[in-house]
Image (cartoon, rainbow, N blue to C red):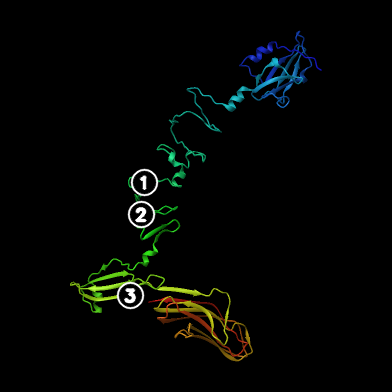
Amino acid sequence: MKARITLIVLALIFLISNASAQFTSLPIRLVTATGTPMTGRAGEIEFTKYPHNYPADIVASITVTEIGTAGNYIAKGFTSFQFVKLWLDGTNQQWFDSVLTGNIFSYLSGNYVTLGTNQTITGQKTTTGNWSGTMGNWDYTGTGLHIFNKPYISGTSPWISDYSQITGTSLLPRIAADSLYLKREFVYYISGDNKLYFNTPGSLGTYRIAKRGNGQLFDFNSDQFSWSTSTGLNLNTALLNQDSISAKNFTGIKDSTWFVLGEPVSKYRFLTIKKPFWHNPLPFPDWKWYYKSVDETAAILARDSFYVMNHSETVTDDTPELFFADGSWNNCDTITLPARGQYIITYDLSLIFPFSEVIGIAARDSVLIRVVNELNVDKQGSHSEVWQEFNDAISYFPESHTLSRTFSLFNPTAGEKYFLQLKGLIHTELVSAAVTKPQMTYLLVR
């Protein structure tokens, strides 16, 4: 067990207790209690930094040199500005206390800036971290061209998304205006009117308001219109099912162009669009224009009416199969007519004839197309025929023919079906024909 050594401090106590003395090198004198110098102990001298756990907090890169034979040592290599404690042969020297070492000037220049009342910062300066200070104004009194970049607001600001906290003198974040700064002269809100006003001062060309989000843009009659968050303003379909819808009467003036119809030049005309009173069997509105002509004595000179809304529908066979012609009538497509009236029906198809290569035959073959009703009665004007002569000395390759026919149909039964049919007059099994992409279209003319 090592004998306990009692150390004393002579001139050292004065040196390290002086608050103005900071060292990158530290002088130490070691003597016994009787004043005998302790020599040869340089290798046992060590220092620790806060929190002074030995040996974890030993200050590295410290060089200790013994000076003479009077127990004087000098420790060099203190760079960091910090308090150190002295350890001798692994034992904390309580008499030494804690000494502040390092270069205070490099520490201050790297961590602090202190300005007097009338001192001026000149030259280019770069700062990092946060600046904190009391309220005050930053005034610029210089001359010449100077550029000031706009300040940025942190996304963690407590009011960057809570606009209720923004005051009249607050810096407005751009997000508050949805990526657009709006002047009051362009758009502003008046709480008393409960309205948002849009102005177009100056010449701005076409000025439009677009909906963004699900807000209702304006007031409307809820009996006639409804608002959808996805499609905006919509006309109520119940409005079209009322017994009567009338438009404003339009009064005409003198018009000599109508004199050829037998009416006098001096007269008044009224045009009214309305839905008939009686039940409409159609799946769409059957509005009519009503025309009436009167003279100055209110006597009716002429009247007429006509439908203003026709209806068209196309039915296409969506199956990818081919319809082959044989000796019987085969259905290719079907339509259902919704109501009685005057129809214009059109069918279109692609006929592949011959369907495969034909070699070494002599024959005449035909393909027939027609439209029939549910009772298998064909409709006049619906027939089409494609025929071809085959010579046994010639090779015939597949060929596509586009067929289209339009015919009229009057007053069919409501809900009646009509069929597009295909038939072949094929004289030999070596010739074949097929239909693809058939479709039927009807136009209800009324």
Say which amino acid is labelled 1: Tyr
Which quadrant holds residue 191? top left
Say which amino acid is labelled 3: Phe
Contact (CB < 8 A) between labels 3 and 2?
no
Quadrant assignment for the C terminus: bottom left
Q: CA distance from mark 2 to mark 1?
A: 16 Å
Query: Label 1's element?
Result: strand
Circle 3 crowding by C-alpha within 10 Å: few under 14, some 14–19, many from 20: few
Q: CA distance from mark 1 to mark 3?
A: 49 Å
Residue at image position (39%, 58%) is: 226
Label 3, on which residue?
306
Q: Residue furthest bottom?
A: 362
Residue at image position (37%, 67%) is: 241
Label 1, on which residue?
189
Q: Is residue 13 left or right of residue 182?
A: right
Q: Nearer the viewer, residue 171 or 336?
A: 336
Q: Is residue 271 visible?
A: yes
Residue at image position (29%, 76%) is: 304
Residue 18, image x and y in percent?
62, 14
Q: Nearer the viewer, residue 48 or 343?
A: 343
Label 2, on which residue?
219
Dot placed on the residue nearer the N-terminal end, 1 or 3: 1
Query: Label 3's element?
Result: strand
Say which amino acid is labelled 2: Asp
Contact (CB < 8 A) between labels 1 and 3?
no
* Above or below, 260 relative to 18: below
